[in-house]
Amino acid sequence: MINCMDSTFCIPGVDGLPRTKGLVITRELIKDYGINSKVNNGQTANAEIRRNRRWTFKLRAPLLLKDNIKIAGGLKYFVEEHNFENPETLDNDFYNNLEDRPLRSLRADIFIMKPTRGNKYFILRISGALNGDFEGIDLGSDYFKFSIAPLIGWKKSNYLSYAFGIAYSEIFGRRSIYPVVSYNQTFSPHWGVESILPAELKFRYNSLDKKNFLYLKAELNGSNYTLNFFENRDEPVFLEKSEIRFLFTWEREIYDFLWFGIEAGFRTNINFDLSENAQINAETLVNNQLNEAVVGNISLFIVPPRKFLK
């Protein structure tokens, strides 16, 4: 790790961090939680979701690596399905249309890191995604979602780095602008903290050989799906989805570049409403409350081999 001195370009990472994940495949399951709904005409409904199944595929790779600028690209495909208990007895249009319907997200990311000669650096992340119940490639502009986050940071030592910025995204379910704070510190050979708030806060424990990493973490996940599942409506509707998850994570090396991860914890819902559009002041068509639920997932991922880092 290079110290941030006036004569060298600043590297924002701190000692103790794991190697960057290149390819990640994750299978997740959330089981048995209730949903209570209120339509804007005053009607109410409730049901039990038997399972919420999710698959995630992520790829990240460097595009340009120079001392004075680093650029990486990323792709992410996410799909989830909701299955109700006794779906044949459901008497609610929203539940009937959500049952066993794949909700997909296909996203591309560009990460730009611009170091300076000193202890300052700049980071820019730009993302474009297609979110919704799409099947093929004949999509309208309503499916496209855009996000951007510029940050300015300072590396105080090989063990402390922080940054501040703003972000425009749909992490809360609707389009919004909010402040972002990144803070990474390694306290000892075993302990550290990694965060980019409000999205994620992680407390890290790692073995000295860096073949095992344990995390206690809280994370905020959110997105907005464009849906065309009401037959009596010409315009699409928008599902606002955001949740906070509290998880225990174990990541373990299988062989050098090949790792696996296991996570378990629980999820509490913030937003799962159906709106007429994706704007901040959108009218809510269906207000949904989800009960807390247990979360579990397993992942397999690839990191750069050690010989590439020497």
Image (spheres, rainbow, N blue to C red):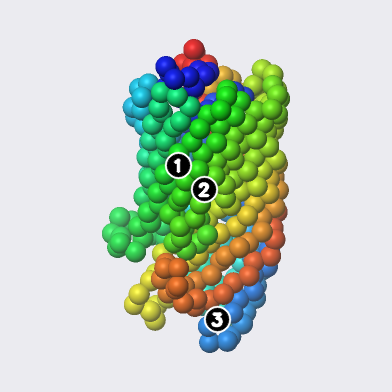
Which residue is tagged 1?
A: 151
Query: Who is closer to the viewer here, 305 or 187?
Result: 187
What is the C-alpha distance between the residues marked 1 and 3? 40 Å
For the point 61% across and 66% down, the residue is 84
Q: Amino acid at mark 2?
A: Val
The residue under the point 36% across, 28% down is 69
Q: Residues within 10 Å of mark 1 (few under 14, many from 20)?
A: many
Q: Marks 2 and 1: in contact by CB < 8 Å?
A: yes
Q: Does the image show residue 21?
A: no
Residues at circles 3 and 2 in contact by the CB criterion of under 8 Å: no
The amino acid type of the residue labelled 3 equals Val
Q: Which residue is label 3 attached to?
A: 39
Q: In the image, is residue 106 above or below residue 140?
A: above
Q: Tag 2 or tag 1, which sits nearer the N-term? A: 1
Locate residue 192, reporting x and y percent. Answer: 67, 31
* Place of residue 132 in the rendered image (x, y in percent of width and height, measured from the top left): 42, 60
Q: Of helix, strand and loop, which one carries label 2?
A: strand
User: Would residue 95 be found to the left or right of residue 85 on screen?
Assistant: left
SS for callout 1: strand
What amino acid is at disc 1? Leu
Residue 180 - label: 2
